[in-house]
Image (cartoon, rainbow, N blue to C red):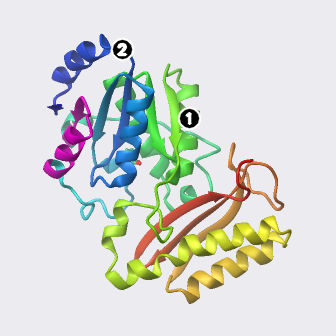
Amino acid sequence: MQLINRLAALRSAVDQLKTGGKLALVPTMGALHAGHLRLVEAARDAADRVAVSIFVNPAQFGPGEDLDAYPRQLEEDAARLKAAGVDLLWAPSTEEVYAPGFATSVRVDGVSEGLCGASRPGHFDGVALVVAKLFNQVRPDIALFGQKDFQQLAVIRRMAVDLDFPIEIIGVPTVRDADGLALSSRNAYLTAEGRMQAAALPAAMQAAAAALRAGNAPATVLDEAKNSLLRGGFTSIDYLEMRAGDDLRLLDRVQDGARLFVAARIEGTRLIDNIPVAMPA
Ligand code: PAF
């Protein structure tokens, strides 16, 4: 595996890699867990060569968010990626990505509004910007993202179509711990007790989805799910909503493709998740 942190070296390494067939990119911010390794596995299935990027992108963190605290462990991550058969690790510095004088923005309207877009203003602009840059830098044929960040996936799909990136975007199902909690680098912020209590999140979501499938009124079901999170140790809920899986519009009744979306805080850590209301047939 080549570990590259300068753009000039990346360009020639990518030219070389692309002679070997289709190139897939898995963009990450590092602190890799089994969910990221699942993306790498899916990339290996979908393409001939696999590149992973590790870049903690300042543009997607708001003031007071965890940019400084975000876990950084490049050596450990690189060893895991090498063992997973990755061909190229692109790990640029902040200055390599955002040179002095950088002044360009990318904004995707519609799907970036509501959900995390409401409580994290500018977050998806930062995501869209860095992913557009990563696409230009690595020039992959395929790019893979986790469905755990479902709104991010929707923003990136829209951006890739709108900006004519000839890249197939693949959404990979969420990897979960045995108790159902979605894997996330932010789970590492939780104490052992908080981590145990966090299982209330997938439990409340599954119970709500079952209640909706059984025909209960969405408003009542969502209220009950919020209450069960607060009883289970969560201190606040940013949102718990039912939306359409394609364009993320709010739904007030169950329909094909409906999903539940949640963001809630426990021990000061904001966890997000989403699940389909009806299991695909
Ligand atoms: O999902 C992430 O880790 C990040 O938002 C991404 C897509 C790598 C962009 O920085």
Q: Residue at x 18, y 44 (%)?
A: 78
Image quadrant where residue 206 sits: bottom right
Q: Can residue 58 be seen in this view?
A: yes
Helix, strand or loop under label 2 = loop
Determine if the magenta segment contains residue 87.
yes
User: For the residues marked 2 and 1, what is the alpha-carbon distance in whole angstroms?
Assistant: 23 Å
Q: Mark 1 points at which residue?
A: 157
Position of residue 26 in the picture relative to residue 211 (left or right):
left
Position of residue 223 in the picture relative to residue 215 (left or right):
left
Q: What stretch is highlighted in magenta?
A: 75-93
User: Foreground: 172 or 27?
Assistant: 172
Q: Where is residue 62 in the image (x, y as percent from the top left)?
A: 39, 58
Image quadrant where residue 279 sits: bottom right
User: Foreground: 110 or 23?
Assistant: 23
Amino acid of disc 1: Arg
Helix, strand or loop under label 1 = helix
What numbered label is drawn on residue 21?
2
Q: Where is residue 174 in the image (x, y as percent from the top left)?
A: 50, 53
Amino acid of disc 2: Gly
Determine if the magenta segment contains residue 85.
yes
Q: Can residue 133 be seen in this view?
A: no
Asked if ligand 1 lies within 8 A of label 2, the reply is no
Q: Residue at x 13, y 49 (%)?
A: 75
Q: Residue furthest top?
A: 19
Which is more N-terminal, label 1 or label 2?
2
Q: Residues within 10 Å of mark 2 (few under 14, many from 20)?
A: few
User: Foreground: 143 or 181?
Assistant: 181
Q: What is the count of numbered marks?
A: 2
| Quadrant of the snapshot with the N terminus | top left
Q: Where is residue 150 in the image (x, y as percent from the top left)?
A: 56, 50
Q: Where is residue 229 in the image (x, y as percent from the top left)?
A: 58, 81
